[in-house]
């Protein structure tokens, strides 16, 4: 199965609602086999989100490609959240420093020095997050360092200072502990397992050091009922804080992965629709001129929008009339000064007598493919091929003043091209080309296997010019020759001697 690599950026510094997505497809299995070669585990726990690996301790996609893209896509958001956490700690350190300096209780200087040290450390980390060195790979190390520093300072405060003389009360220290735990689960980007282990170890050491310090106090009795109730309540509070942090973490991961997957699906679906639209446009452009195809697709698009509006207003789709065709309105134009070219392969019957159908079709496809390139190069519009006959026009459906020169150049290059074809395939064929200029009716006929075509007596006359021509030469009518302005050397064609309908032409 082909894996789809999706890059999804949300919430830039300019616009929080901005979305940037890029897609790359590669050959990879969309399962956990991408990373460890094993199928995703089938546990009893429900999956957190679609395409989840099934692991609750490490919520991630079952594809390493998707997970890596999610990490890269959400990195700006995680970095911004981490910077907000650093700003919060910086503001708190400033407030604590002012509070301790003004209060000037016992050990206030040590608390001020500690607060200033944390302030400087967080400011340094903030500048580091703004540099190019802060990436997805250094994010975990930076988060671990900050968490360990905060935990160590608070644990040292709990262990070495007696609370009756400390500037911070028991409730204040416990509030700081709660803030650190919640920050590790929410705004400090770390994997769940790391956050749980570090948070649990911090809670245990906090309470152990707290009661060791309390036991050193005079007249302290742990067997006191009030102390036992307080210890049980604090343990219960620690458990509740961890459960709250886990809940926030899981909700954040589920929302993040689900949003990423849904946006990825919508982007891939939109990309597939664009590919299908491109294929449809390419197919339509292959059967009719680009100008006419664009007008038809625009008109059908407007009609589709009108029909959707009518459905939304009336609640049902209007019935189509039986006489209504695929393309509306019906296009038919009368155009003057259009040059028509007919070309026929001389020696085609002999060439086809000793070849199979597959070989013959392959040769014609090669030759007519070269003619198609010439038509586009010389400003001609291909109309059709019939057997070994090639049929194109110039000056239709888009008028151009050099239509006659375009057709003559097309005919001359066709003669040169078929000589190259004979050298490449070791065949002996030639081209007979006829060109006439006049008035045509052009448009699209049919509702199934429709095609762009031209009709008029001048078209029939161009066919006669080809039939009465000579191999290796371009047979032009007098109506065409008057547009040359002495650009070519002309000779008497004497086509009327080979085709009676050309007398006087």
Image (tube, rainbow, N blue to C red):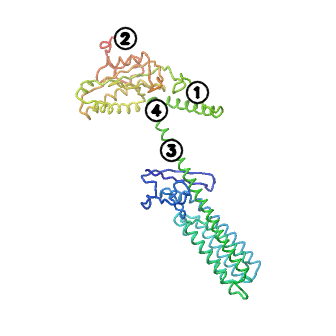
Residue labelled with disc 1: 319
Label 4 Cα crowd, 10 Å radius (few <14 / some 14-19 / many 20+): some
Residue labelled with disc 4: 285
**Which of the two labelled residues, at mark 1 and mark 2, occupies the earlier sequence position?**
1
Residue 49 percent location from the top left of the image: 55, 55
User: Which residue is rendered at x = 33% and y = 28% of the image?
Assistant: 414
Residue 145 percent location from the top left of the image: 57, 72
Question: What quarter of the picture does the C terminus occupy?
Answer: top left
Which of discs 3 and 2 lies nearer the camera? The answer is 3
Label 2 Cα crowd, 10 Å radius (few <14 / some 14-19 / many 20+): few
**Which of the two labelled residues, at mark 3 and mark 1, occupies the earlier sequence position?**
3
As drawn, is 401 to the left or to the right of 93? left
Q: Which mark is residue 85?
A: none
Residue 152 percent location from the top left of the image: 61, 77
Which of discs 4 and 2 lies nearer the camera? The answer is 4
State whether residue 436 is above or below residue 300.
above
Q: Quadrant of residue 235?
A: bottom right
């Amino acid at each position: 199965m082909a894996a789809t690599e999706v890059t999804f950026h949300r919430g830039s510094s300019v616009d929080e609602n901005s979305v940037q997505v890029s897609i790359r497809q590669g050959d990879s299995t969309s399962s956990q086999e991408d990373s460890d070669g094993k199928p995703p585990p089938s546990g009893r726990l429900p999956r957190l989100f679609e395409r989840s690996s099934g692991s609750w301790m490490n919520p991630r996609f079952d594809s390493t490609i998707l997970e890596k893209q999610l990490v890269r896509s959400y990195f700006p958001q995680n970095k911004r959240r981490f910077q907000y956490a650093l700003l919060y700690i910086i503001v708190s350190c400033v407030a604590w420093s002012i509070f301790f300096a003004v209060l000037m209780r016992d050990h206030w200087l040590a608390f001020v020095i500690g607060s200033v040290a944390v302030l400087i450390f967080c400011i340094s980390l903030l500048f580091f997050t703004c540099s190019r060195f802060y990436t997805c790979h250094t994010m975990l190390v930076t988060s671990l360092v900050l968490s360990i520093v905060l935990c160590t300072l608070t644990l040292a405060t709990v262990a070495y200072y007696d609370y009756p003389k400390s500037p911070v009360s028991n409730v204040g220290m416990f509030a700081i502990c709660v803030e650190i735990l919640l920050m590790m689960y929410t705004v400090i980007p770390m994997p769940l397992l790391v956050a749980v282990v570090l948070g649990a170890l911090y809670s245990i050491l906090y309470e152990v050091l707290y009661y060791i310090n309390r036991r050193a106090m005079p007249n302290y009795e742990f067997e006191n009922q009030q102390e036992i109730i307080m210890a049980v309540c604090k343990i219960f509070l620690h458990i509740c804080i961890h459960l709250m942090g886990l809940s926030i973490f899981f909700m954040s991961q589920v929302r993040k992965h689900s949003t990423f997957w849904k946006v990825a699906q919508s982007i891939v679906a939109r990309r597939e629709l664009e590919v299908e639209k491109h294929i449809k446009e390419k197919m339509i452009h292959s059967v009719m001129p680009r100008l006419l195809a664009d007008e038809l697709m625009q008109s059908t698009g407007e009609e589709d929008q009108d029909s959707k509006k009518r459905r939304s207003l009336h609640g049902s789709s209007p019935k189509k009339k039986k006489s209504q065709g695929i393309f509306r309105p019906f296009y038919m134009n009368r155009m003057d000064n259009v040059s028509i070219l007919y070309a026929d392969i001389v020696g085609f019957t002999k060439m086809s007598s000793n070849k199979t159908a597959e070989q013959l079709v392959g040769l014609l496809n090669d030759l007519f493919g070269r003619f198609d390139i010439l038509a586009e190069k010389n400003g001609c519009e291909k109309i059709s091929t019939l057997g070994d006959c090639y049929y194109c026009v110039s000056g239709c459906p888009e008028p151009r003043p050099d239509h006659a020169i375009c057709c003559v150049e097309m005919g001359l290059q066709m003669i040169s091209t078929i000589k190259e074809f004979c050298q490449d395939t070791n065949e002996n064929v030639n081209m007979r080309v006829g060109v006439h200029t006049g008035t045509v009716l052009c448009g699209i006929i049919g509702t199934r296997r429709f095609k762009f075509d031209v009709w008029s007596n001048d078209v029939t006359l161009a066919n006669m010019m080809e039939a009465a021509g000579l191999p290796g030469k371009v047979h032009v009518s007098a109506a065409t020759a008057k547009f040359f302005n002495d650009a070519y050397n002309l000779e008497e064609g004497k086509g009327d001697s080979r085709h009676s309908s050309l007398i006087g032409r």
